[in-house]
Image (cartoon, helix red, strand yellow):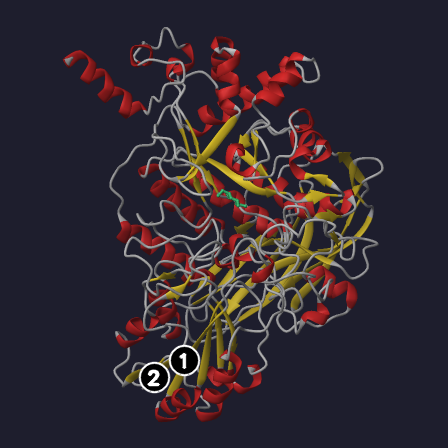
Amino acid sequence: MAHRKTRVASCIGMALLAFGGTCAAATQGSDARPWMNPRLSPDQRAELVLKAMTQDEKFHLIRTEFGDNQNGHTMSPGALGSAGYQPALARLGLPAIQESDAGLGVAKPLKLGATALPSGLATAASFDPAVAFAGGAMIGGEAHRRGFNVMLAGGVDLVRDPRNGRNFEYAGEDPLLAGLIAGNAIAGIQSQHLVSTIKHYALNDLETDRNTLSANIDRAAARESDLLAFEIAIATGKPGSVMCSYNRINAVYACEDDWLLNQVLKHDWHYPGFVMSDWGAVHSAAKAALAGLDQESAGETFDKEVYFDQPLRAAVASGEVPQSRIDDMARRILRSLFAAGVIDHPAKPAPIDFDADRKVAQRTEEAGAVLLRNRDALLPLSAAQSVAVIGGHADKGVLTGGGSSAVQSPQGNAVPGLAPTDWPGPRLYQPSAPLAAIERRAHGKVDYASGDDIAAAAKLAARAKVAVVFVEQWAAESFDVPHLALPGNQDALVEAVAKANPHTIVVLENNGPVAMPWLDQVGAVLEAWYPGAAGGEAIARLLYGEVDPSGRLPVTWPRDESQLPRPTIPGAGLASIGMPPQGQPAQDVDYNVEGANVGYRWYQRKHLEPLFPFGYGLTYTHFEYSDFKPRVEHGRVTASFTVSNRGSRAGVDVPQLYVTLPGSGEVRRLAGWCRVNLKPGQSAHLVATADPRLLANFDGQGRHWQQPAGDYQLQLGHSATSFQGEGKVTLAAASWGADASPAGVAQPCMTGG
Ligand code: BGC
């Protein structure tokens, strides 16, 4: 009996949940399991396991089940109550797979809580790969200490539409910026010995009808835009897994798209990891397996049937799917587990330093909030001023986006009970109240009004020296917002407060660009995105100038919907969640309207003037550029320049290098940038290198990249529309195969001599 008890205890530690294994087998030495030798390469180790595997064990590995107790699913005893679970393969010493959402922190179990990063757009707005890495390492560390070994993170779908309900999970509209930010976030997560995904592959750029929608786009345009973001992020972060998306692309479901998975991802990009499906994104067995899908996620709960069990076994038996394909699926999964350190550094419950982690979230917000307007240097505030704080539940906390990525604080939801309380809710607030953070700084009187009573709020504002109005736009996975207007009576609230007090500051907590009909009436606007676990503190530090705003917009801010490639999204809105009604044809969305010219490139091509351009953001000081000199050095296009802080405060600048290729009209591309911290009066001599992946066009016919011969115009920008420094270099024609992209730039910015 005693013996038995000991064995059970060691089983629990190893999460051995009876897939043909025993505890005794699990304690075998590494001689019997040569793949446990960490000196072997991940490929060698995967190969060794594969050789030892039975067919049942391979089929065990290529699917996960839902890890939660919802949607009619009964959670398996070993699961942690999150997105995905696969029992351990005890005989082989392989741990259970425990998968957790998502890119902004550990989302489940909701009640346990975790540290929420600000929106992905805030991280992207920092233009700082180190900020992205630190955020990834923080959330990956929490996930590992909760017992998870796969994190469903790395959102990098491009922002083609500011109304997409998941923009807050992504990294903006530019492929280079999004790719480097998401890639570094993934590298940060994986530094904690977890597999990270990159998702949602690909073109899941709208949520409306996402389960059936066909994203129609010319393949070459896709390679230069959305797929380029994935290519750069994968090369940078080396995620163990790619999550294929719900939508179809040119009528083919992403998870059974041979072009997307086999040709582009695995052949052209030499991707060695595995493709897992999104939850409910599989529609076939043989077709999906042959197209390159390696693992079906939670099929028993979300797919019509578990395709990667009996139907796939039958396809192997009939010869439709070769055995070598099943082996390849298993090998890829195993390789990623070894490469990320999942086997050598098992995830297990351990204490979490929430105070330290909240600081990481705070620094991300401080680096990524964008100051959009600051008339007459209204900001920074001085402690002597009295303040009316209004709206946005600023007395309680800051808003969080909804859906599978929503993270609840360990202290709970600061504003419980707001609709929707069910999927894609609950609507969560982080308990980091801006009001308290302002009170800690102001010596003058600080009052609060909820904003529900507009007249009362205006009255409060009139009595204070300055008014800070918090406005919010909740967005979530599974729906798009139908228009850019702020919900409810918030526009009227801002207008009334601005009328009562000329020193009105608006703080936006939102999914991204919104209409601001009152913009000219207010003194300052701070884009705080969804500000994360320490949002209140970070916002107050920015408002009081304890830290200089340094974020730059990773998305173009339209004047209104008419400037967008598609002025309306048919069927958008919270009411549209779910599948289209029976019999209704699936939606098509025509991304050929803008093609590869996403975001700022669309505005340039159409000669449209946005409200705020990509790359834009104010600081409490100002910067000037001089000595701009582009040149070609060792085959790389570089530009040296001097950036000088001409103001009276220290601050951070993000000089941006844009390139116009020969024959591309007026469409510029972001090719590199620097981020530099300068004291008042200080200058720095810097060299930015253009990423070679931005200097070529994809030739869809010939399936190669083509660098055209001719003059390349280079411009140094404060944003995508404001330049100080211009020149050109001449390049000879060059081309390389679709499978031979040049390596990216290790150091896009260097301090010059
Ligand atoms: C989302 C994924 C998520 C998965 C598991 C899906 O609805 O699209 O991003 O990782 O659910 O929760």
- Whether the residue carrying mark 2 lies under 8 Å from ligand 1 is answered with no
Q: Are marks 1 and 2 in contact (CB under 8 Å)?
A: yes
Query: In percent of the image, x 36 and y 40: which residue is there?
Result: 143
Q: Position of residue 649 (x, y in %)?
A: 41, 73
Query: In percent of the image, x 67 and y 68: which residue is there?
Result: 721
Of 255 and 202, the residue lying toward us: 255
Task: Give the residue type that dot 1 points to.
Answer: Val
Q: Residues within 10 Å of mark 1 (few under 14, many from 20)?
A: many
Query: What mark, if any, has residue 387 been given in the picture?
Result: 2
Relative to 351, 340 lies left or right: right
Task: Give the residue type that dot 2 points to.
Answer: Val
Q: Is residue 373 above or below residue 730?
A: below
Query: Mark 1 to mark 2: distance in Å?
Result: 7 Å
Q: Residues within 10 Å of mark 2 (few under 14, many from 20)?
A: many
Query: In percent of the image, x 55 and y 51: which residue is there?
Result: 749
Query: In percent of the image, x 20 and y 14: which residue is there?
Result: 4
Residue 745 visible here: no
The kind of secondary structure element at disc 2 is: strand
Relative to 291, 453 lies left or right: left
Q: Position of residue 487 (x, y in %)?
A: 53, 73
Query: What mark, if any, has residue 468 been given in the picture?
Result: 1
Q: Which one is earlier in the sequence, the residue at label 1 or at label 2?
A: 2
Query: What mark, if any, has residue 608 been given in the picture?
Result: none
